[in-house]
Image (spheres, grey):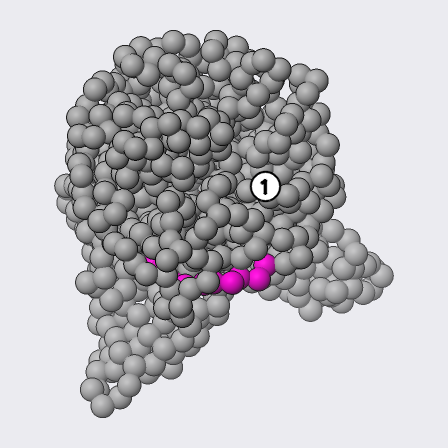
Amino acid sequence: MFKLLIVSCATISLLTTSIRADDWPHWRGPTRNGHSAEMAWLDQWPTDGPRVAWKAKVGLGFSTFVVAKGRVLTTGHADDKDTVFCFDADSGKVLWKHPYPAELGNKYFEGGTTGTPTIDDERVYQLSRWGDVFCLDATTGRVIWSKNLQKEIGVRIPDWGFSGAPLVHGNLLILNVGDAGMALDKTSGKIVWQSQNKEAGYSTPLPMGHGNETLVLLGSRQSYVAVDVLTGKEAWRHRWLTQYGVNAADPVVQGALVFICTGYGKGGAMLKTSAGQPQELWKTKVFRTQLNPAVLVDGHLYGVDGDTTSPASLKCLEFATGAEKWEHPNVGSGALITAGGRLIVLSGTGELMVAPASPAGFKPTARAQVLKGKCWTSPVLANGRIYCRSVPGEVVCLDVRKP
Amino acid sequence: MKLTRRHFLRAAAVAGLATPFTTRGADAGRKFRTALIGAGWWGKNILKEALASGRCQISALCDVDAMGLEIAAEQVSDLSGKQPKTYKDFRELLDKDRPEIVIIATPDHWHALQTIAVLKAGAHVFVEKPTGHTVNESRAMVKVARDAGRVVQVGLHRRVGPHHASAMKFLQSGAVGEIGMVRVFAHSAGGPEKPAPNSEPPDGMDWDFWCGPAPKRPFNSKLHPGGWRNFLDYANGQIGDWGVHWLDQVLWWNGGEYPRRVFSTAGRAIRGPAVLNAREQTTDAPDHQVAVFEFPKFTCVWENRQFASNDAEKHRIGAYFYGTKGILHIGWRDGWTFYPANKKEKPLHEDPQLQEPDGHNLKLLWANFLAAIEIRKPAAARLELAHRSSVLPMLAMISWRTGRSLQWNGAREEIIGDAEASKLLSRPYRAPWIYPAA
Ligand SMILES: NC(=O)c1ccc[n+]([C@@H]2O[C@H](COP(=O)([O-])OP(=O)(O)OC[C@H]3O[C@@H](n4cnc5c(N)ncnc54)[C@H](O)[C@@H]3O)[C@@H](O)[C@H]2O)c1
């Protein structure tokens, strides 16, 4: 996928609106695992932090950013509406907005948007917590098609609403809706396949190669499931009970190894899936990623262990064995990505840190308080800029381009 | 059992018994067989304290939601290395497991029947607040407990919370002067409400059993887990939830005396009208409520609001005691603060000492419960006390439903001269469950 992007970029790089090499068009970035291939960015900052390119306010929510062709999108909630915002990446100017009525949905948390939109070339896809699906024109924000799955076919809405980002695969739009996902025709919104009408989990559909096929991994209410992307046929299912059905963190995949990990004290398990039904290779109780998944760098997992209600710490685990390498306490319910062998961590209270991804320990080379208040959303690095948001919806775009 | 502590110790010594009652440490190796009914959010918090005390072995868990039950069982075996037995039906648990202590952390509409069943099975009870859903249920619990001679501790951990205890001392020292009025309140964010679609209950959930003696609403994700608080069939709104804690502080201070008159008004001004049909539903609890409790020597006002939450008001939750020497606020995470009437004096403040993540003092309450069992010290949040704090919101609800104030005969626990309101002291049960006789 990533190679493909580079190739297509080279051929069309003269067009001003072309995909740039280091775009981040969907949740978890170009390779869907929290990795950016960007190497040349500043990982040492002046004491007051990197230059703030622009700031914005988007309303309450947990949606992270997607970036492509000079546009940056995120969502937030205010005044009984969710809004998809499209900003100009350079100036922070609002290019368009797409508001739609939505409930606050503040059951046990402040509420607001939880999912992230997806950019697919000239289209933007958005799944709301309450089952609205929008296909928008990426240039204008015009609605190309929209529907509400709850109203159309009565799908069951999980306790905190749908939160996985849509996945585009060929002509299909895969959603974590139903017991084991659902696929729509991305051009029309027509349902192509669907699963049993049971409560979904909260992860984003994650594609995974399996022989010549592509499977999609989904966190469901009581299990992690793999289905054939084209038909929705179930390949395997691993029973995984997490409190309140919060199978939220995406699996971390390497070859046929699938690491699943959830919060509320549950922990993680390494699954070997080459033989069909998964086998558990190891389990851990000391790594519990509640909302944001870990990143895998050179045989080690890095992620936030602990719930939003706990002090939560950053941890490093060996991928092969599950052995804990280090713990950095009190990062809060933050999130991280990785680029060029470094971790970019946004703490639960808005401190942005950069540190080499190393099993030897967590030694930040840069840190700055970039936001105030609660931050539970993953930062994003795209084209030399880091985007961060807080729960109330303060957005900062930080310039980390090398001069 | 009418033995005084000294009597008992002497009797035990004579008999050469090493019962768990002798002293706290004497038989520390022996663990109470402890069971939990209602393995949801709070049940698991209590369970953790029971295990952490080192004095309890979790022998059995019960829930009508198989998934929640399995998750709780996994947590117990993680924490203790022992796998508890699991049951859907609490009657079967009591029958087969024969626990010595039972924790009840089900939704409010189950507290009375389950407490009574546990007491009749001979175990001590730790039951969550409020004690019941209607007044006569709660009275029946008190009556059965009196006959059973077992300890019943109610989950009002604010009775032992360090900053509550010191605030109470401060009040009782006279530092706030004569108190003429108390205001208790809990405000939080919220807005208009849209109905959510009804659905099949989740796999492994016995919804009929969950509803039990209460009306059976169509299943809806707004209800379970936790959301039942906002449905009047199963709870009494914010006043019946947060209100119990803060009204209990008032009754702690005034020695448990009942008010003689109660009036309440409430509504869904912001949430909008309640919806319930075959397709969808909203909650039906009010989004704001005011209740006035007239005591012989002071007036107490309860207020809750689930909208318009910002920092305009200094405290969002707690109790204000208005005295001639100043105003005392007892809060939650904001501890207590005394604002002196004399402008020259500085405010006094004490931070809370809470257990996180959920900001409670269950460890202390559990220790107090075990002490009550072992050395017969009266439990700090014993049923007789918690019953009264639980009854106040129920009376407010009756006043709101009937649209008039109630005269309350506290000594007899009767509404004076109002047959229609008096009827609401009980409610019909759904068969086969039978309303407990007070
Ligand atoms: N003292 C406090 O500070 C405090 C705080 C929170 C909750 N609580 C109290 O704890 C109780 C539980 O609240 P919660 O938030 O944990 O609710 P919850 O919905 O998370 O848990 C209740 C559990 O009871 C189960 N249940 C329902 N009927 C049952 C039955 N017949 N048998 C067995 N299990 C049954 C439900 O399936 C659910 O798992 C309430 O009474 C609440 O007022 C007290």
Q: Nearer the viewer, residue B98 or B237?
A: B237
Image height of A346 relative to A79, above or below: below
Image height of A247 relative to A47, above or below: above
Q: Residue furthest bottom?
A: B344
Image height of A403 relative to B237, above or below: below
Q: What is the chain letter for disc 1?
A: A
Task: Give percent across and percent down for residue A271.
Answer: 66, 29
Q: Nearer the viewer, residue B229 or B154?
A: B229
Which quadrant of the figure contains the C terminus of chain A? bottom left
- Residue ID for mark 1: A296
Q: Residue at x 65, y 25 (%)?
A: A256
Q: Nearer the viewer, residue A106 or A301?
A: A301
Q: Which residues are magenta?
A: A362-371
| SS class, disc 1 | strand
Within 10 Å of disc 1 (Cα), the crowding (few <14, some 14-19, many 20+) is many
Total labels: the figure holds 1
Instruction: Place residue B10 in its image quadrant.
Output: bottom right
Task: Give percent across and percent down for residue B61.
Answer: 62, 36
Residue B314 in view here: yes
Whether residue A147 appears in magenta in the rendering, the answer is: no
Q: Amino acid at mark 1?
A: Leu
Instruction: Place residue A5 in its image quadrant.
Output: top left
Q: Residue at x 24, y 66 (%)?
A: B314
Q: Residue at x 66, y 23 (%)?
A: A273
User: Main SS type for the magenta part?
Assistant: loop
Whether residue A365 appears in magenta in the rendering, the answer is: yes
Task: Give percent across and percent down for residue B266.
Answer: 18, 45
Q: Residue at x 85, y 61 (%)?
A: B16
